[in-house]
Amino acid sequence: MTYHQTIEYLYSRTPMFQNVGNKAYKEGLSNTVILDNMTGHPHKLFKSIHIAGTNGKGSVSHTIAGILQSTGLKVGLYTSPHLVDFRERIRINGQPIDQNFVVKFVEDYKDVIEDIHPSFFEITTALAFSYFAEREVDIAVIETGLGGRLDCTNIIKPILSVITNIGLDHTALLGSTLEQIATEKAGIIKPKAPVIIGEYTPETKRVFEAKANETGSQIIYAQDNNLILSEENRSIDCVYYKTEDLYIKSELAGYCQNKNANTILHATYKLKDLGLKITDKDILKGFANVIEATGLRGRWQKVSSHPLIVCDTAHNSHGINYIAQQLESYSNNKEYSNIRVVVGMVKDKDISTALALLPKNAKYYFTQASVERSATAAEIQKIGLSLGLHGNTYNTVPQAIAAARAEASPNDFIFVGGSTFVVADLLSMVEFYIQG
């Protein structure tokens, strides 16, 4: 098979949550254990850091990877979903997995795939761990796919766990309360391995403390000690954070990144305590070059000027709340004539709660991404109109973006988001596409 035939085979033979949602989810680790046994337990051949949470996993994972890369370590990075290219999910020092390795792995384990019918994420996780082992990474940053306790990444024994925050998302699978969701995420806390909790509530803190007591794990609440003393010189694609010792330039300028940065710093300092040789220079370089170093995209990312176009993958009310605050600040900025919002969401999200957060003085372009999970543009428009958001419908993201650009003046601000997959469709457009 060619690489493209291999990827099409995976898409067609293994259900992918990215496309079909809950019916792709397979509870339990039975398939993962089978694949791990057949591949020779590759995750035991490298150190790992495990990262879970409702929002911020991607930013935290990539930035920690960027910091570790700056030290000279060979760093694996496993994240999901991908935006444009499958190989974005599996990287070593920022470089996507080799196409030939993907092809050979699938050919070698095709009989197993046909026999046990793993999910897309189960086979991809086995692929990632095998790749990191064969290429002899020093350490890998592993992001959970969904939850934690029963997530197929949860066979690893990390030197550090990180849980960014807990919000009401994937409630049909993880539970309808913060405590239930926290219980699933807390499943990544392992015996004697320290854990960083980025943000907590009284309900979730009880869950985390109970699990840490059970496993004998040191627990560090980043929220209780904000290392970010102030932020300065914020722009579209840059923000500076001041700590007691550092003046950090970060490429990730979304409002949510302040809390992510605090979580990252706590994780980094704990990694230093665990013996990793990380200097202040490494921290500064990791923050300043995270996009180039790791390939991260879609986090308050500027993709065009005049009119300014920014996209973000925030896809639930917990994340969109930060987007709404940032859009509000731009709507009050006289530098921009009008705010235009291209928005689409998937059916399994709380669309009404998320849309209710968005500014009412913007012009909306309701659309749908090219995945089966997407709510239709008409469904989103109906909810939007009931909340005072006005605009027309467009059957595809490119059509919506084209309409917004055609109506915009050079001084307008266009935001594209509401779903990871809306951003993926934007970044797949020829003029915005960057392979890998």
Image (cartoon, rainbow, N blue to C red):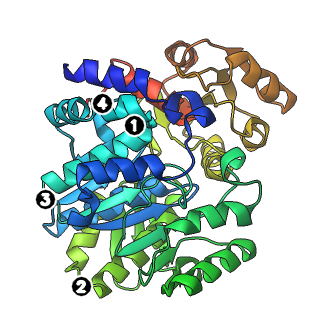
Query: Amino acid type of disc 3?
Result: Glu
Q: Residue at the far right: name it.
A: 386
Query: Amino acid type of disc 2?
Result: Gly
**Label 4, label 2: how far apart the Cα atoms are:** 42 Å
Of residue 419 and residue 212, the one placed in the foreground of this image is 212
Count of marks, rendered view: 4
Q: Which residue is mark 1?
A: 82
- Does 391 sit left or right of 314 as displayed? right
Of residue 107 and residue 205, the one placed in the foreground of this image is 107
Badge 2: residue crowd in 10 Å (few <14, some 14–19, many ≥20): few
The answer to whether mark 4 and mark 1 are in CB contact below 8 A is no
Residue at (31% x, 66% y) in the render: 48
- Say which element carries label 2: loop
x, y (%) of residue 175?
72, 54
Which of labels 4 and 1 is toward the front?
4
- Say which element carries label 3: loop
Earlier residue among tags 4 and 2: 4
- Say which element carries label 4: helix
- Say which element carries label 1: loop
Which of labels 4 and 2 is toward the front?
4
- Does 5 sit left or right of 230 as displayed? left
Q: Is residue 389 above or below residue 98?
A: above
Earlier residue among tags 1 and 3: 1
Q: Which residue is mark 4?
A: 111
- Residue 147 occupies which quadrant of the picture? bottom right
Mark linked to residue 136: 3
Earlier residue among tags 3 and 4: 4
Mark linked to residue 227: none
